[in-house]
Image (spheres, rainbow, N blue to C red):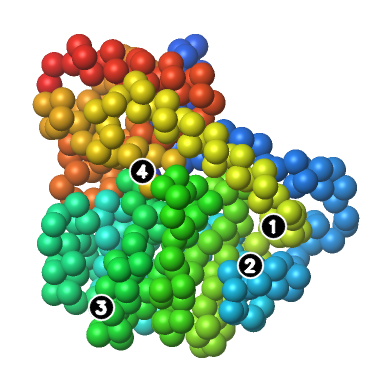
Amino acid sequence: MSAIQIPLSASMEITRRASELSRQGKEVFTLSIGDTHFSPPVNIREKMNHLPQAYSHYTSGDGIPELRKLVADHYGNYEASQVIVVPGLKQGLFYLMTVIEAQHVLVLEPAWLGYETIISICGKTPVSVNLKLPDWKEQVANTRFDIILVCNPNNPDGRLFSVEELEFIRLQAEKQNAWIISDEIYDRYIYSGETPSMQTIDNYSKLVRCAGLSKSHAMTGFRIGFLLSRDTALMRNLSALNQNTATCTPAISQYLALEFENALPEVQTFRDYYAENLKETLKIFPEWSAFTPQGGFYFFVDLSIYGISDAEKFSSELLENAFVAIVPGSAYGKGFDSWVRISISLDREKLTKALLLLKSFINQYKP
């Protein structure tokens, strides 16, 4: 029997190719990866210089108690026993798809490219609804599902779900006795003046909230995420799976994470910086105003406004000729062949150079 074929991550593959070109001496601008350009907040960096011996040893599989308590209090109306610390949300989502008894998982597209792969690896069936269609709610109401995935703010388009939309999602989940998995990894990057109104669904009994410090605290490499649920049986199974696979989330990451609330003022400066990046982007591309993200740090742009229908071909030629890396929209769902995701989470001077190169390339591009 041959090994199963697992698709590569489109964004990571493009970033890998960008790194190759950079090693060849090219000045490459990477607008393809979902990472901040900041270092972790000062108080976390300072703590790294004073690491007790305990930081290098096993912790409880569920996470150190003081961190679980901090996370529970931060998100409100949770107990420490209702939190498990996982080695990154990708791993956490894999755990959820493994232990929840379900078959059909509804993905609201455009969606983070890893969802469908994780769902399929775990033997479940991904089904999708396109949020860009005017009748998306009707489609959700007419789709059979056991789990619905909601990313709020959404990757890749920065959509912030309204209270009314979340109420609708909860109602549909209740009708089908389905789980809601709420991915809130970008919740510190909101530009619209609103906040994700998770209280709308927070008391739903089959809700799992997913959070972490990768994006907010510039700690992608530390691999630390949180799963919150009030379902005792689910938490027991998640704990058992974590113990039997990862053993525990890296101890050093957990102990450093104890500073996450104290670092929030500096995290706000990260958000403010990218809010200015957003404005700078719109100065260069005012025609992208219709694609302005409410949260996250990406623009999801339909290149058909320039007469470009094949974003994959365009993205490849852009990288090879102008040395700017972006991700084609086909990675984020069906019906997005003319779309691209463009990250604005980098130094503003580099971002400006990259966007000007992109603008020049578009102006001379012949589809």
The amino acid on which the numbered mark 1 sits, given as a three-letter code, is: Glu
Q: Are marks 4 and 2 in contact (CB under 8 Å)?
A: no
Q: Tag 2: residue type? A: His
Q: Position of residue 295 (x, y in %)?
A: 42, 48
Tell me how far mark 4 sits from mark 1, CA to CA. Answer: 26 Å
Which residue in the structure is indicated by mark 4?
293
Residue 298 image point, x, y percent: 39, 39
Q: Is residue 275 left or right of residue 331?
A: right
C-alpha distance separating marks 1 and 2: 8 Å
Residue matched to label 2 = 74
Task: Give the vertical position of 113 relative to 91 (above or below).
Answer: above
> Residue at (38%, 59%) from the top-left corner?
151
| Residue assigned mark 1 | 261
Front in this rendered view, residue 315 or 285 = 285
- Whether 43 is drawn above or below 105: the answer is above
Give the secondary structure at mark 2.
helix
Q: Which of the two labelled residues, at mark 1 and mark 3, occupies the earlier sequence position?
A: 3
Query: Do the CB atoms of the residues marked 1 and 2 lie less than 8 Å apart?
Result: yes
Among the 4 quarters of the image, the one containing residue 106: bottom left
In the rendered image, which residue does mark 3 sit on?
Answer: 172
Return the disc, 3 or 2, that comes first in the chain's sequence.
Answer: 2
Percent x, y of residue 292: 33, 39
Q: Could you tell whether 362 is left or right of 118 in the image?
A: left
Whether residue 185 is visible, yes or no, is yes
Q: Is residue 103 visible?
A: no
Choose mark 4 or mark 3, whichever is in front: 4
Secondary structure category for the residue under label 4: loop
Q: Residues within 10 Å of mark 3 (few under 14, many from 20)?
A: many
